[in-house]
Image (cartoon, rainbow, N blue to C red):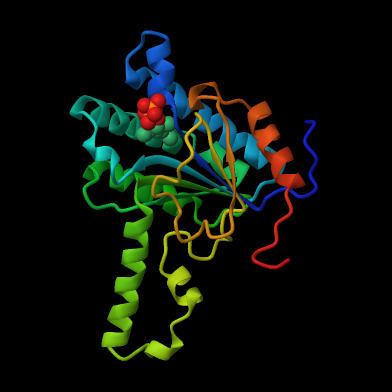
Amino acid sequence: MAISRENLPQHVAIIMDGNGRWAKQRGLKRTEGHKVGAEVFRNIAKYCSDLGIKHVTFYAFSTENWKRSKTEVTAIMNLFRKYLDEMQRRAEENEEAGYNIRFIGSREGMPKDIVKLMDTVEERSKDKSNTYVNLAVNYGGRAEIVESVKSIAEKVKNGTLKIEDITEDTVSAGIYTAGQPDPDLIIRPSGEYRLSNFLLWQSAYAEIYIDDVLWPDYKPEDLDRALEAYAKRNRRFGGV
Ligand code: FPP
């Protein structure tokens, strides 16, 4: 492993983009790209864990992705189902690896059986602490902030919280990644320069790295390159 362990980010977040283009380039159906993308997710999550990166977040399905064709949405849901089933079958292996797996995003609108599988996987891994793996499914950054604001409003309404006591930490406590550090590095493969509603609250001071590689082609060497670039950056958090 060539990558230096100095200046490693605590939290890396990745937008898994480019599956469709990858498939198109090969004359395959878009869903074939997602299939390969899911394998790459597994490999890269393991590589992050091997490197000692404590928190990793992957963007798999956004609240906007429901607009895609029914065939594509169904294929992605089937992939989740298959993947979650497999996770349960590999539960011992995952326990040994010490993965703490969380699904961030809204459970509303998701197929019931998938929600049940998500709950089971989360419950089984909740005491592990080697690597925290967040998979963003039916996730929207704005929706996440709205949920936090609603829970704050509820507390103000029932008198358990005073308006003057609301701070940034209060909002942070109500978002899906509560308790985890904000991402230090957000990687977007496939050459798009957008956050696409990903981790809007958490990305305030994140370094962003854009790569041309399409997600199904993404390799540990590509992550090394992003980590090397990150290690060289001078993060000032608004200071000088
Ligand atoms: C973005 O590429 C990818 C998605 C919207 C779906 C991502 C889903 C996976 C990687 C499968 C995840 C499954 C598991 C089990 C983790 P795109 O389709 O927008 O590509 P394009 O921009 O080239 O069209």
Residue 162 at x, y percent in the picture: 38, 90
Q: Which image quarter holds the C terminus?
A: bottom right
Q: Which image quarter holds the N terminus?
A: top right
Number of callouts:
0
- Who is closer to the viewer here, 173 or 128? 173
- Who is closer to the viewer here, 127 or 12? 12
- Who is closer to the viewer here, 77 or 186? 186
Residue in the image at 76% along x and 45% along y? 232
Residue in the image at 35% along x and 29% along y? 79
Judged left or right of residue 113, residue 222 is right
Residue 85 at x, y percent in the picture: 37, 34
Judged left or right of residue 6, residue 217 is left
Above or below residue 211? Residue 62 is below
Return the residue found at the far left.
70
Above or below residue 129? Residue 172 is below
Residue 36 at x, y percent in the picture: 45, 21
